[in-house]
Each structure stands twice: as structure tokens, then as C-alpha cells.
Amino acid sequence: MSRPHPVQVIAVSGGKGGVGKSNVSVNLGIALAEKGRRVVLLDADLGLANIDVLLGITASRNLQDVLNGDCELRDVLVNGPGGIKIVPASSGTQRMTQLSPMEHAGLINAFSEIGDQIDVLIVDTAAGISESVVSFLRASQELLLVVCDEPTSITDAYALIKLMNRDYGTNRFRILANQVKTDQEGRQLFEKLTRVTERFLDVALQYVGIVPYDEMVKKAVQRQKAVLEAYPRAKASTAIRALAEKVDNWPLPTSPRGHLEFFVERLVEV
Ligand SMILES: Nc1ncnc2c1ncn2[C@@H]1O[C@H](COP(=O)(O)OP(=O)(O)OP(=O)(O)O)[C@@H](O)[C@H]1O
Ligand SMILES: [Mg+2]
């Protein structure tokens, strides 16, 4: 058997709602696709402003149909902007830890089939630290936490880091400051967060920079378009491209952790 193809699995999370997780997920995906990566975006949020609403996509099938054995994962993939593929949200994403053995096996099979055709899997999680969110986080090899300069965003991110560290021993987190005005503001936000984590936890936070507050993001959301496509030269788009450049340089997984099969196995582990 050939060695499984390494896939970079990045969960985009942050604790607090509305910080910009979905916008970062979609646009980072497009920016990586621009660099030639084959990107799949898994919408793991059943909430209101999820990927399909954000991009005006109507999906006729979702992961639940795969779990039910009604179709293959490739039938569920929707073509998104910039050549990315999207796995639409489904009620199945809420109960990943309660799958039947049949569903369990079906899911592993489903993902193994597309493993060779993708380079990056981006998981856009829901807000909060529900069991479902945690199951996606512990299965992913990179955790990209989106924070913004509000006390609740910092405390929620801290709560998420603490839980993942305590329950799963996760000690590496990437921090992105969104909706800040300047680089300096982003840096300060990162320092606020590290001050509390360093004091109470044994974790390493890695700063990945900022996406500035940009009205063009709001305009794009209103038009149900990704800002990177609608306004490629907007400040936010430039920042996302810089982020993609860094993400593309993150070391590629060499351990089993870096394979899609591992992701799915961890995902459904009780
Ligand atoms: N860089 C930015 N500049 C300006 N506005 C932004 C920026 N990022 C996000 N927003 C605004 O915040 C809103 C919420 O963004 P998004 O839906 O990506 O957040 P989320 O964290 O995924 O929310 P939820 O927790 O509900 O899933 C967007 O509709 C947009 O109006
Ligand atoms: Mg969202």
C-alpha cells in the first residue's frame, strides 16, 4: 500500500461567536488555492451565518447523507469560490462523537477516498467549546484561533485553550488577531492573551499576525461573496494572502497525525 498523502488539517476556532472564523476560513482557503493548493473547507457549524449563507450556496446534500450511506463524499462536495471545495454543514456535525459503528466506518472510508486529492482541509468550527467543537479541534493538527480585541473574545479563547490543554494535552495554538486597526494593536492583543496563558498554563501560543478591520469584508458578506474575490486588493485580502503565505510554510506533517485518516479516526473517537 502506498503511504497516505499528507494533508494539512487546520481547525479555525476561537471560542467567541462572530469574531470572524468563517470569513477567515473561506478566504484563507481561497488564498491557499491561489497558491496551487487543493483545498477542502469543512463547514462544521450549523449556526446561522455558516459558509453556505456567507457564500450564497445551496447544498442539496451534506455529510449526513454520507453517514446514511446515501452517497459518497465526492457527491457532497460543492464548488466554492476560487476553486475551493466545500463540505456543507449538516446535523451530523453536531454528533460526531455519537456515530454508530456503521457510520463511523463509512466516514473513515469517505475521507480516505478524497485524501489523495486534497492538500489542505480547513475546518470552520462553531462558536463555543461544545463537545462537537472540541471533537474537531482535537482531531486537527493545526489550531488557528481567531481573536478580536474584546474582553469576551480573550476570555473565551483562554477558556478554549485551557480546556484543550487540560483534557487533550494540546499545547500549541496559532493566534490570529482579527478586526484590529493596526499591527501594533494585534500584537498587544496577542500579548494580553499570552499574559494569562503563561501564568496559568503550559502552552505555546504562536502569533500569526492580523487581519485588519475592513469595511470591504462587510460589503463582501452583504454580497455573499468572499472578500478575496470581490475585493482582491482590499486591506483584509492582502492580509489574508500574507497569512496564507505563512500557513503554506508551516511544516508539513510527517507523523500519522498529518493524514486525513487520522483526522477522521480522532474525530469519531469517544
Ligand atoms: N476583518 C474584518 N473586518 C470587518 N468586519 C469583519 C472582519 N471579520 C469579520 N467581520 C464581520 O464580522 C461578521 C462575523 O464574521 P464571521 O461570520 O466570519 O464570524 P464567525 O466567528 O464565523 O461567527 P459565528 O461564531 O457566528 O460562526 C462578518 O459578517 C463581518 O461583518
Ligand atoms: Mg462562523
Image: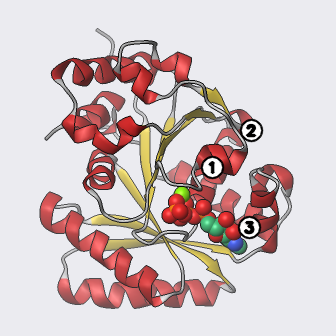
Residue at (33, 38) in percent of width and height: 258
Three-letter code, disc 3: Ala
* Mark 3: few/some/many CA within 10 Å (<14, 14-19, 20+): many
Residue at (32, 53) in percent of width and height: 137
Q: Is mark 3 within 8 Å of ligand 1?
A: yes
Secondary structure under badge 2? helix
Q: Is mark 1 within 8 Å of ligand 1?
A: yes
Three-letter code, disc 2: Gly
Residue 215, image quadrant: bottom right
Q: Report the front residue among 216 and 129.
A: 129
Callout 1 touching callout 3 (CB < 8 Å):
no
For label 3, the residue is 236
Up the image or down, 191 lies above or below 35; here it is below
Q: Which numbered disc, 2 or 1, marks the residue that appears first in the sequence?
A: 1
Quarter that holds the C terminus = top left
Left or right: where 119 falls relative to 132? right
Residue at (36, 31) in percent of width and height: 260
Q: CA distance from mark 1 to mark 3?
A: 13 Å
For label 2, the residue is 82
Q: Is residue 21 visible?
A: no
Q: CA distance from mark 2 to mark 1?
A: 10 Å
